[in-house]
Image (cartoon, grey):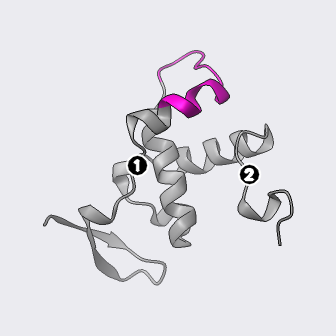
Amino acid sequence: MISVWQRDSRFEKRAVNMSDFFRLTDAQMARLEPYFPKPHGKPRVDDKQVLSGIIFVNRNGLRWRDAPREYGPHKTLYNRWKRWSDKGHLRSDDNRPGGR
């Protein structure tokens, strides 16, 4: 098992097992791709990598800056989450029909 060191929200280092990382499968991403905007301009960080990071951060209640580097820059994760949420591409469970 491979571990990486990550700073947690209290600025202490802690080990994160690589097996704990969340990754969308190719099949899952293929179903989601039609709902996301097409890239324009300069090359972007991979949408599958970023979306996996967004899910990981939200599932684990992390701050954006505490996201593992394997998902890309934390600023990219936040910016894409914000942009996609504002456009209605993402929604939280709280916004589901009949939600809490």
Q: Of discs 2 and 1, which sits in the foreground?
A: 2
The answer to whether residue 51 is magenta is no
Mark 1: which secondary structure? helix
Residue 40 image point, x, y percent:
60, 16
Indicate the position of residue 76 as horizontal and vertical percent values: 54, 44
Instruction: Tell me if 22 is positioned left or right of 36 in this view.
Output: left
The mark found on residue 86 in the picture is none
Q: Residues within 10 Å of mark 1 (few under 14, many from 20)?
A: many
The quarter of the displayed image where residue 67 is located: bottom left
Are the residues tagged 2 and 1 within 8 Å (C-beta)?
Answer: no
Looking at the image, the residue that sits furthest to the top is 41
What amino acid is found at the position of numbered circle 1 in the picture?
Tyr
Residue at (42, 77) in percent of width and height: 8
Say which quadrant the N terminus sits in: bottom left
Q: Kindly tell me whether residue 79 is visible in this rendering.
A: yes
Residue for point 43% across, 34% down: 27
Residue 10 position in % (x across, y down): 46, 84
70 and 18: which is toward the camera: 18
Amino acid type of disc 2? Arg
The residue where tag 1 is placed is 71
Mark nearer the N terminus (2 vs 1):
1
The number of numbered badges drawn on the structure is 2
19 to the left or right of 61: left
- How much space separates mark 2 and mark 1, taking CA atoms? 20 Å
Question: Considering the numbered disc 2 on the image, is that residue within a helix, a strand or a loop?
Answer: loop
Q: Measured from the top left, where is residue 63 in percent x and y?
A: 56, 68
Q: In which quarter of the image is the C terminus?
A: bottom right
The residue lying at 79 percent from left, 37 percent from top is 87
> In the drawing, does residue 76 fall left or right of residue 49?
right
Q: Mark 2 points at which residue?
A: 91
Residue most extreme to the front: 98
The magenta span reads: 30-43
